[in-house]
Image (cartoon, helix red, strand yellow):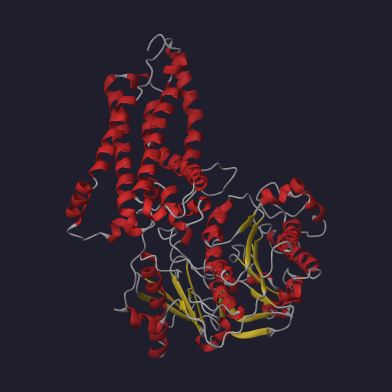
Amino acid sequence: MRNKPRFINSNPVGIILNLLWVYVCYEICRLAFLFENWGLFSASMTWSSFWTITLGGWRFDTSAIFYTNAIVILLYLFPLHFKEMRWFRLTTKWLYVIINSIAIFANLADSVFFEFRKHRSSMALFQEFKGDNNLESIIGTEIVSHWYLVILAVAMILFLWKCYRYPETPVRPLKRYYLTQVITLIVIAPIAICGMRGNTFLTATRPISVNYAHKFVNDPLQTGIVLNTPFSMLRTVNQLAKSTPILFADEESLAAVYSPLHIPADSLVERKKNIVILIVESFAQEFVGALNKDLDNGTYKGYTPFTDSLLQHSLYFDQTFANGGFSIDAIPAVLASIPRMDRPFVLSPHSLNHINSLASELRNMGYSTAFFHGADNESLGFNAFVKQAGVEKYFGKNEFIADPRFGGKNEFDGKWGIWDEPFLQFFCAEIGTLPQPFLATVFTLSSHHPFAVPDKYKDIFVDEGLHKLHKCIRYTDYSIKRFFESARKQPWFDNTIFVITADHASSKRTHDVYMGEVGGFRIPIIIYDPSGELPTGRQPGIMQQMDIMPTLLNYVGYDRPYIAFGKDVFNTPAEESWAFNWDFYPQFFKGDYVMRMENGNDISEIFNYREDPLLKNNLKDKLPKEIEQDMYRQMCAIIQSYMQRMDKDNVSIKE
């Protein structure tokens, strides 16, 4: 060993080799998982799909390995020479073997358990089995019946023990040794952080989550092969569901109050309309002058002259709300009618569930589907969720830059992605190539911090408003206008329904009426039908983001049952319409009132949000009992139905 080149025995090479052995064990566990569950995967598995799954799986392995071995890496590279003493070396080795042995056992155990749950175990597992007295006997039985996995685990643990490389012996002078160790730690630290994230800070704003596994599969079941159990556990720490209000003892009484199961009516009329959805970043209702005619004593103009003009020819409802406060809440709500339920769906332990979506159901009617977002293709994990939702094509910054027609790299804003105007022109051109009928969704990004507009417009969209965001809203509104100018020239235009909404409201609010927890969720939801078949103008009632899916499916005549947590606003009486959102606490809107709940199942506040928009007068116990109880039962039913269905992976109608 001493005769080998020094770099072979160096600490950087030593820790790399030690981590490499762990990668080998994770891949062996993946193969064991696949063979143990081969009956579930054999019909959909090909060599090509397995290679894609393996490449994707290495990203999740990297995250899990760097997370679980973080203390080992730190101890191994600690820039003090006493770490090479025998007791320190043995402590580091034992930690390395014990930590990775637990990971091996977790992965192999899940290969047995997967058959029953159809997805990797998360921290919710401990909640589900809390209080079970026969868990030890079940585990003992499975260990005996799967003895070969126990032998495989022991073999891998011995492999790690035998192959472990100790840190190098310190060299003289110690000054040189310390310098080398510090430099090594400085170099390895950012690599380890990127490894934990599963991506770099340059390619994505968020670390990968369990939902990101959908990016690498065609069948949601295959996410079990992509993922590993340590990653799934780590990513769902602190993601356990809060206590569910169990007000209804059986499914029949629950469904009598609320059910997300939509059964098509016999009177459906098939209309194979194209559907185009524009989800506009931070496009709060406050910014739209036509929706605020009484603001500032009737003098308020807003920042959206084109949207104001479009509203004259569109359908919209009296009250419209977002189902969450973040961009990652909007896509599930709009495309799959899934609300944020105390945490984003895509970050929850339920994010691997099978779901129905606007795209998956419209494909049954022969629709082609595509999603567009001008940011990096991995930004916010949108590409993973839209694939889970059944969207066929994804167009991001990469595809835009590859197309020379619209400016390429010159249209990159230097921060988030492609400026709205050129990207919406790209969007218009690309959806024209989709076979009709089609569903095409675009998510804009220019109305986002740091609130800049292209240089060519800096003298046109100036800081006229009360905040520099307002010039971005003007620019985005202009970009939407330019999109419609191009779209009107297309042969598909007259047979298309357009929906314009926001991902969420804006944090940059300037009027008191929009400052509270009601105003902070107000967004426009505008439905524009160039053919004139839909009525226009303001309609009575309440609409929310997750109503878009069932409303459109029913309107185009979709004739199969599906799961959607929202409602069809065209067939819901105004007095029965409602909305729900949950940021810090659940809120339920119905009629003139908003109800809040605390501690999982207690009413905390009720306000008349129309007459009291600043929510100063709590009406709890002051309203007629039937109003309060009706709202309470319906809100509890929504939460209970959601939680119970999510826990059982019963949020889709499977073919």
- Residue 330 x %, y %: 55, 64
Q: How many marks?
A: 0
* Residue nearer the viewer, 63 or 148: 148
Residue 63 makes an appearance in the image: yes
- Residue 489 x %, y %: 81, 69
Q: Is residue 507 above or below residue 615?
A: above
Query: Looking at the image, which residue is at 68% across and 85% down?
Result: 535
Q: Quadrant of residue 374?
A: bottom right
Q: Is residue 98 above or below residue 647?
A: above
Q: Is residue 183 above or below residue 585?
A: above
Using residue 279 as the reference point, say whether residue 531 is left or right of it. right
Q: Quadrant of residue 314?
A: bottom right
- Residue 589 x %, y %: 49, 79
Query: Looking at the image, which residue is at 34% across and 25% down?
Result: 163
Residue 344 makes an appearance in the image: no
Which quadrant holds the N terminus? top left
- Residue 116 x %, y %: 32, 59
Using residue 641 as the reference point, say whether residue 370 is left or right of it. right
Using residue 374 as the reference point, say whether residue 544 is left or right of it. left
